[in-house]
Image (spheres, coloured by chain):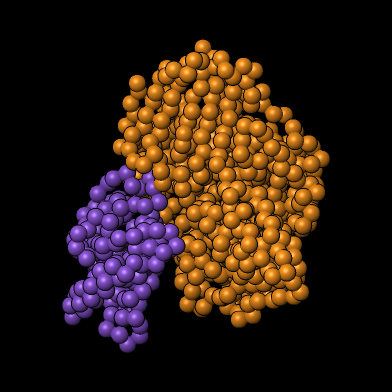
Amino acid sequence: MTNKLETADSPDRLKRVVIEPLTRVEGHGKVTLLLDDDNHIEQARLHIVEFRGFEKFIQGRPYWELPVLVQRLCGICPVSHHLVAAKACDMLVGTQQLTPTAEKIRRLMHLGQTLQSHALHFFHLSSPDLLFGFDDEVRHRNIIGVIEDYPDIAMQGVLLRKFGQEVIRMTSGRRVHGTGAIPGGVNKSLSIEERDALLADVDQMIAWGQATVELIRRIYLEHRNYHNEFATIDTSMLSLAREDGALELYDGGLRAKDADGKLIFDQIDNCKYGDYLHEGIKSWSYMKFPFIVSRGMENGWYRVGPLARVNNCDYIDTPLAEAARKDFRELSNGPVQSTLGYHWARMIELLHCTEAIRDLLHDNDLLGNDLINKGDMQQTSIGIIEAPRGTLVHQYEIDDDGLVTKANLIVSTTNNNQAMNESIRQVASHYLDGKHLTEPLLNQIEVAVRAYDPCLSCATHALGKMPLVIELQNPDGTLAERLVKDSDSTFTSS
Amino acid sequence: MATRKPILVFGYGNPSRGDDALGPALIDLLTEQIQPGMPLEHHVELLTDFQLQIEHAMDLVDRKQVIFVDASVTSTEPFGYSAIKAGKDTSYTTHAMSPAAVLHVYEKLNGKPVPRCDLLSIRGRSFELGQPVSTAAQANLHAAYRFTLENLINDIS
């Protein structure tokens, strides 16, 4: 199933194009393309710097620090790391069942996180591509362009994200790097004032969630065939699912379906994930390549995230999102494999989050005082959660003093590693092959990656401090062409 | 949206990065002044965050005045105080938007001019990760605090 463009036969004889950094994607990513003399693509690879050092850094730290420590992994979804580490710590402190208040506060926090992250992705990062076109002028193809041309849409995005941040602040204590989840429970519940403040706005958020689903639906269907084909690959999909098959973001068992939608496994206990998923290694990448054991490394890779979750689940337990899911699944007889379908699926989840937040806010358990439940300590633990971008695994071992001796983290980006590589190869072979490379063409590579795993953190360095430089080298290593995006977004070629 | 207090003081910076914490530190000092029964209770709201982002434009809505508080690496005085105008720059592509860019977003989203906005810049010296606010910057912080408190009390009088 692996695309032939992964490794060229004679790389030394080929020209090399590097897109570095990829803007608006998580971490410091780059794409390398190898081309022959006629600009035919012979090799395409995505490289992302992983946070492997963090697993070593964690060692020796007391386990109770983990939910706070691991948030520093990511500036975009720290809450997901916070919660999955807390889930793993629940096992360490012997918690068999969280108190109702603790579980619902955590679920609310996670819904707020997913809502704000999905809003960030769609409105801030990807809507410029979707609203203006992949080849729009780069000075205009950004969030400020959206604010200027579509202020109503931009306002909805800003306020949806802000609402999610408020949910996080009220459940974790802070908008960023909160401390609400602790081993065995939470350290605060909601006050009546906090609950009522969120209730006052939640119906508006649901309405905007509906509008956003309709927006991406319209954009997608306007160029249905193109969007169906762009960066599309047929893959298996992995996610958590509730025992009854419902979409599940916080807990549940692992479910995998093949490219035709047939179950590979279902309701796998989190603690047994290692029996079903392995991580492969390739010589050219520091990032691992997870795969489903029964399928082998060559054919067992898969996709995670909104597309996988919406495809994998049997239903969504909130009515508006469920109606949107059914509509979305009409795109295909089997699973929707369109990579740009990620955007649509993500907005369905955003709508679900708004509905689920409203439902939870009417549950008085959120106001309770029974916050922690602990049992007998144990020394190994595994936590799995559906982070906004996909399945996230934390595994820990501690010693008798409660100090971490081993940690393994499989983040969403790693789970999507092979799939993102395959999608950029599809784009490279379909849209770039044989052409003179320009910024709009190369942006299509970034559009494919953004559909999986966008993140603002990389853009921090995109302008001013780290200009985008694309170099085309001859086989002898001399420079053939150089394209530079400066801090004011102007392009110069030399 | 609940009724907002007319004045927002927004200190931003990384509390774990030495003198970058000066903005949040000033907010900490002001917190006591907005407690129940204190003169600023009904007039001033305090806010902190690591960096400015697009969403912060919405914190400016329905304000009479906004004071941004940040650490400064260029100031030669213990602190500086100046008005800010909306301006479009490229900082929106980063995690660290400029106050002017936040004001620009506000105007575009709301279709009206921003309220009166000022920037209080407190001189910092050391920005090392994991370090507390330096001794030298502490003096600047307290000078800026006294200045701010005096101004706020004058404004509401």
The quadrant in which the N terminus of chain B is found is bottom left
Determine whether B126 is above or below A189 in the image. above
- Residue A21 appears in the figure: yes
Q: Which residue is pictured at 34% across the width and 67% down the height?
A: B134
Q: Which residue is pictured at 66% across the width and 65% down the height?
A: A403
* Chain ID, purple in image: B
**Residue A94 % position (x, y):** 74, 71
- Residue A106 appears in the figure: no
Q: Nearer the viewer, residue B34 or A246?
A: B34
Q: Which residue is pictured at 46% across the width and 47% down the height?
A: A456
Q: Nearer the viewer, residue A407 or A178?
A: A407
Residue that lies at the very extreme toward the top in this rendered image: A38
**Residue A51 % position (x, y):** 57, 48
* A278 with respect to A67 (left or right): right
* Chain ID, orange in image: A
Q: Nearer the viewer, residue A157 or B28?
A: B28
Asked where in the image residue A11 lies, by quadrant, the reply is top right
Residue that lies at the very extreme toward the bottom in this rendered image: B37
**Residue A473 % position (x, y):** 46, 19
Q: Which residue is pictured at 19% across the width and 59% down the height?
A: B76
